[in-house]
Image (cartoon, grey):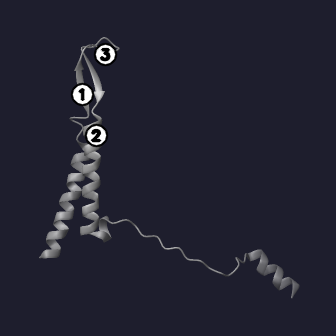
Amino acid sequence: MYARARESQAEVLADEIIEIADDSSEDFIFAEGEDKDGNGAKKFINKEYVKRSALRVDARKWVAAKLLPKKYGDLTRHEVTVNKPLVTLNDELEEKESA
């Protein structure tokens, strides 16, 4: 039951991430005065709200990755080093012809 509850919690966080990312309701601030087109209000980007939304998304991604690392964690890449030289088909044919 505990594992299922943790999985559900991670899924809720993933859903919240989408909601936060899609919500643009407070992305702009309107100030009194006219903008350059002569309209009634100036429109400014609400940088504080946008940054806080990014922080909220990042926090939820981090927690989801800790709860379900196989599904939401960072991908791990493994590098393999081979100490043999690369042999092409032409190299093999030349060896056979010279033998």
The amino acid type found where label 3 is placed reads Asp
Quarter of the image with the N terminus in it: bottom left
> Which residue matches tag 3?
35
Quarter of the image with the C terminus in it: bottom right
4 in relation to 39, above or below: below
The kind of secondary structure element at disc 2 is: helix
For marks 2 and 1 on the same chain, the one whose residue lies earlier in the sequence: 1
Within 10 Å of disc 1 (Cα), the crowding (few <14, some 14-19, many 20+) is few
Residue 38 is situated, as x and y percent measured from the top left of the image, at 30, 11
89 in relation to 34, above or below: below
Identify the residue at image location x=16%, y=72%.
Answer: 4
40 in relation to 91, above or below: above
Mark-to-mark CA distance, 2 and 3: 22 Å
The amino acid type found where label 1 is placed reads Ile
Mark-to-mark CA distance, 2 and 1: 11 Å
> Which residue matches tag 2?
50
Name the disc covering residue 29, or none: 1
In the rendered structure, the answer to whether residue 97 lies left or right of residue 29 reads right
The kind of secondary structure element at disc 3 is: loop
Q: Residue furthest top?
A: 38
Quadrant in the rendering for residue 34: top left
Within 10 Å of disc 3 (Cα), the crowding (few <14, some 14-19, many 20+) is few
Identify the residue at image location x=24%, y=28%.
Answer: 29
